[in-house]
Amino acid sequence: MKTKLKGCPDRIIHYPPADVLENVRRHPLGVGFHVVCLGWFPEARGSGIERPRGLNECIMIFCTKGKGWFETDGRRVVVGAGEVLIIPPNKAHAYHADDEDPWSIHWAHFSGTAAASYASLLPPHEHVMMLPAGDFKAIANMFRESYRLASTGFTERTLLLVSHILRHALGILFFQIGTSLSGSARAIAHDLTKSIEFMRANVACSLTLQELSRHAGLSPARFSSLFRDQTGSSPVEHYIRLRMQAACHYLDTTALSVKEVAAELGYDDPYYFSRIFQKTLGCSPLAYRRSVKG
């Protein structure tokens, strides 16, 4: 393994003590996922690493400014500001800051029985993801909070907390609607945030697939395919769930009858509404209202 870390006087690197790391590896809340090390390299000119045999840990690199490159399987891709590089375990790779516009990067290595599952969510040969602008600051703040905690001295509790914080960052990266792959995959991705906001704003309108796809500026078939790829459900299924979520709110917070709730949500037939509610929630509207919550 070859490593270069030149030109980073302000860099942050945190490695937990071996005994703390071992305790967290065995902890019920750490066995599935735990951070092995983490850090911050600002304007890391000349920094890079080459691992011909990979590493038995997953790696996340979040580029906040500048750019660098990543290479594996004979392919090289540029990683720029707002992009996150995910490297699976045991994957031969190399990465390096750009010579002219060196990147500033937050990074973390993580392991555990569930750790590799995140990298496995990526399509073959794709390792870079683009963060939506709204999530950029949130994830940067998660790293900063992790450094603050680590600087107080690693204990088992501290390392578990840092691991939970950065697992949350990965959750946003992989499951937040609007996050997309970069590179060649970015061209076929579509930000569904506005489509879902449109659904939420019109839960009482009985929108059709044609109306939803028209709002997205796509054909019904294309919109359905992209929506299912990114959410796991069809646009209509998701829209129905949002409408039933609104129905739950009415049932929980008002004295409206089931018929009146149905009417509020644009259902002319309360019996049809009740069937949809039962199918979605697994119980009737009245049974839901009577159930104990909280």
Image (cartoon, grey):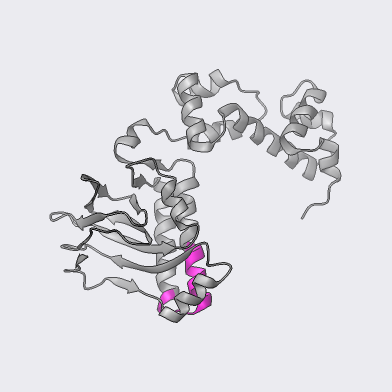
Residue 187 placed where, x, y %?
A: 33, 32
**Residue at the limit of the structure toward the left, as seen here:** 100
Name which residue lies at 51% across and 69% down. 161
Name which residue lies at 21% across and 73% down. 9
Residue 120 vs residue 242: left or right? left
- Indicate the quadrant containing the N terminus: top left, top right, bottom left or bottom right: bottom left
Name which residue lies at 55% across and 31% down. 198
Count all numbered tags in the image, as a single digit.
Answer: 0
Name which residue lies at 25% across and 54% down. 93
Which residues are the magenta region? 150-165
- Indicate the quadrant containing the C terminus: top left, top right, bottom left or bottom right: bottom right
Residue 29 placed where, x, y %?
A: 57, 67
Residue 92 lies in the magenta stretch: no
Residue 103 placed where, x, y %?
A: 23, 57
* Residue 132 location, quadrant: top left
* Residue 11 location, quadrant: bottom left
Determine the main secondary structure of the stretch shown in magenta: helix
Residue 284 vs residue 207: left or right? right
Q: Does residue 292 show up?
A: yes
The one nearer the camera, 204 or 77, is 77
Residue 141 placed where, x, y %?
A: 42, 62
Q: Is residue 227 above or below residue 255?
A: above
Residue 155 lies in the magenta stretch: yes
Q: Is residue 153 above or below residue 116?
A: below
The one nearer the camera, 117 or 100, is 117
Q: Does residue 152 show up?
A: no
